[in-house]
Image (cartoon, helix red, strand yellow):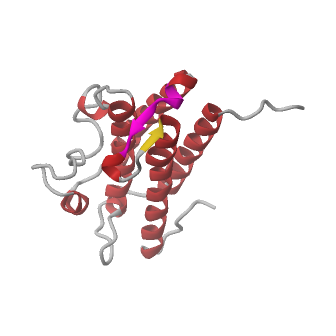
Amino acid sequence: MATEPATVKSTLLGALRSAHFLLEATMADVTDDIANKPAAGTANPIGSAYAHAVLAEDRAVQEMLQGQPPLFSSTWSGRTGTDRPTPFPDSPEGSMDEWYRSVKVDVAGCRAYAEAVYAASEAFLAGADDAVLNRSMDMSFVGMGILPLATVFAVTVVGHLNNLTGEISAVKGMNGMKGYPF
């Protein structure tokens, strides 16, 4: 059986779906108590790392890549499973460090919100044509220069999800739990 040649879109969709699967599988046995338990040293609590992964994907795909309001400030306002969204860098809402240490996460609520975010991200990619995927984006504000949207997506969405899944896995291990599901 012959397979279709990979395209940028199919590669990004496959990587995104894999990142979503691994994050959710890693979170499968996490209760609210474990999610909100302070982590040792300077590590971030599991729940805030999970919420950050989902909130950041929402903000990146909806706001940064499409110029639309994130789901957390529109259709999912007040229903993200967190008591507040992550602050922007240098915002009067407080620092990310403070947010990570003090946000309260309802895992089931955040998981429901995550499903909506994942569906919206996958729909964006599924509908993106080559012109969208090749659109130049100025990422100089984070030291990355001018990049095609596809590369920005790979780094700021898929890479970020994978990084945070690893962080969650490590903190689970520090709590005597199995980190990754395999």
x and y, in percent, of residue 107 in the image:
36, 49
Work out whether 62 lies above or below 88: above
Picture residue at 35% right of the left edge, 59% below the top: 35
Viewer-proximal residue among 50 and 65: 65
Which quadrant does the N terminus fall into?
Answer: top right
Please say whether residue 155 is one of the residues in the magenta stretch: no
Dividing the picture into quarters, in which one does residue 48 lie? Answer: bottom left
Count of marks placed on residues:
0
Residue 118 position (above or below residue 45): above
For the view shown, which residue lies furthest in the bottom direction? Answer: 41
- Pick the residue in front: 177 or 39: 39
Confirm whether residue 147 shows in the render: yes
Q: Position of residue 180 (x, y in %)?
A: 56, 62
Can residue 128 be seen by looking at this rendering? no
* Residue 20 position (above or below residue 133): below
Per the image, is 137 magenta? yes
Residue reaching furthest to the right:
1
> Whole-percent x and y of residue 98?
18, 61
Residue 153 higher or lower than 177, as above or below = above
The residue that appears at 29% across and 39% down in the rendered structure is 80
The residue positioned 48% from the left and 72% from the top of the image is 173
Quarter that holds the C terminus: bottom right
Q: Which quadrant of the view contains residue 102?
A: bottom left
Question: How far from the left and from the top, in percent, is residue 150?
Answer: 52, 37
Q: Is residue 110 left or right of residue 152?
A: left
Q: Nearer the viewer, residue 19 or 109?
A: 19
| Apparent side of residue 162 relative to residue 56 in the rendered image (left or right) | right
Q: Residue at x 43, y 75 (%)?
A: 174
Find the residue positioned furthest to the left. Answer: 92
Q: Which residues are magenta?
A: 132-139
